[in-house]
Image: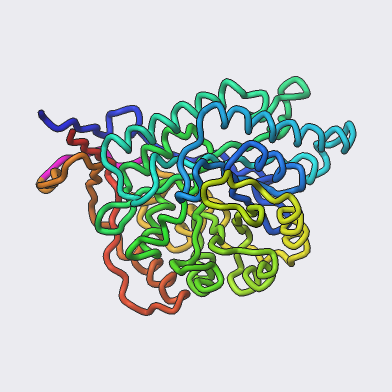
Amino acid sequence: MNAMRLTGSAPSLRQHTITAPVPAWRHPGHVVLETCVEDVEGVRISARVGADRAELGANLTAAGTTPSIGTIEAAIFAAAEQVEQRRAQAGAHWAEKPEAAAPFGLRILIRPRGGSFVYDADEGRAMIADVRRIATLALEMAEFTRPQATGGGRTTLPPAVDLGFVVGALTEDGTIDRGLVRLLVDMANGAPVTFHRAFDQCRDTVEAYGDLEGLGVRYVLTSGAAQTAADGASVIAGLVASGGPTVVAAGAVRPDGLVDLVESTGVREVHMRCPREGLTPDEPQRTDEALVRRAVETVRAVPVPASTPSDGGAEAGCASLATLGAHPAWHPCHPPRPLVPGPGSSVAGESSRFVDIYSPASDRRSRRLRHARSAIGRTTDASPMLTPIFCLRLTP
C-alpha cells in the first residue's frame, strides 16, 4: 500500500497562529496549584477547596490514559457547578472579584495506553480523534466552557471551566514527535495544551523546550528530568529563566516542600497528586480533600516569584524571541513555510510512524538555547536547531 502523506495543504496542517492574548485569569496573583485526579469527584473536590486546575486522567496507577467522553462531560458539569456556587456567594458583582471570576481549569489527559511515549500511526490517529471529539464537546457545552457576552456584547464574562489538553509524544530517538504534537495542538481548537512528563525522557530537554514553544504548546509539565521536582530544581530553574511555555513543576511534589521548590526554581505553577492514604493499585485513586485543602493553603501563602519571560506559550515567546532577534521563519506567531518535499523527505524503514521534515534554523536560536543550557549549568555548545516545515507521513 502506498504511503499516505498529509502536506501543508491539509486542513490540520494549515497556519497555526496563536494571536489571542492570554486571559488574565490564567495568571493569577498567586502560585497556581494543579491537582491530578482520576474521577469526577476528584475534579469536584479540587474546584470546591480552591485548587486552580485539575488534570483528569483514567488509570493513574498505570501512568494514566484518556478518560471516557462521559466522564469528561460529567467533570465539566461538576467543575462548573462549584464555580457557579462560588460566584453566587460573591454576589452580583462577582466579575469584579478575581478569586470569584476565575474559571476552574480542567485539563484532559490524551494518552491511548500506558508504557512508552512513542506511538504508531493508529495510536496517533486515536489521540487526534480524542482531542477532536473533546473539543467538539467543549463547543456543545459552550455555556460552561466559553466566555459569555454581556452588556450587549460590549464585554465578556469568564467561562466557568477553562478546558484544555495534556499531551505528549516522542520519537524513538528521544525527541519531540513534532508532527503528532502539532496536529494535536491544531485539533485543540485554541484550547491550552500542556506537554506532560514525557518531556523528562527527551534526550535534550532544552532543545525539546524550544521545540514545544514553536508548536504552540502553552505549558510544560516537568520534574527537571529527575525522579522528583526537588532533585531537578536546577533544570526547572533554567527552563523558567529561559522563557517560553509556562513551566509546571511536577514529580513527588508535596505541601511540605512547596515553599522550597518555588523559592529554588522561580516556578509559578505546581502539579501534584493528592490520593487518599492506604489505596492499593487495584483500587480507584480517590482524592484526599484534606490534602488538597492543605496544598491550597500552602501555595496561597507562598510568595509569588518575580515575573519571568515564561508567561504562557507563544505570546510570551514572541516577545522573548523578538528581543533576541530570532529568525522570523521559526517565529511561533508567523505562518509556517509551505511544504517543499525534497531529498530525504521520506524516511527509509519507518513503519506506522508520524514523521516530520525539518530544515536548519538560524544561529540566533542556537544562542538562545546556549543561554538556557548555561542557566541550568550545562555549557555545551548548542546543536543546530531545526525548524518544522509541517509534513506528516503516515505509512500504514
Which quarter of the picture shows residue 272?
A: bottom right
Residue 173 place in picture, x, y as percent: 25, 58
Q: Any magenta on residue 337?
A: yes
Is 370 above or below relative to 320? Answer: below
Is 290 above or below relative to 111? Answer: below
Which quarter of the picture shows residue 31?
A: bottom right
Residue lying at 49% horizontally and 44% vertically, measured from the top left: 59
Q: Main secondary structure of the magenta part?
A: loop
Looking at the figure, which quarter contains the N terminus? top left
Residue 260 place in picture, x, y as percent: 66, 73
Q: Any magenta on residue 126?
A: no
Q: Does the image show residue 54? A: yes
Q: Does the image show residue 314? A: no
Residue 23 place in picture, x, y as percent: 64, 42
Residue lying at 63% horizontally and 53% vertically, measured from the top left: 275
The way the protein has been coloured in the rendering is rainbow
Front position in the image: 285 or 252: 285
Looking at the figure, which quarter contains the C terminus? top left
Q: Is residue 73 left or right of residue 3?
A: right
Q: Is residue 53 left or right of residue 391?
A: right
Front position in the image: 252 or 202: 252
Residue lying at 72% horizontally and 58% vertically, measured from the top left: 295
Q: Which residues are magenta?
A: 335-342
Is 67 above or below relative to 264? Answer: above
Which quarter of the picture shows residue 54?
A: top right
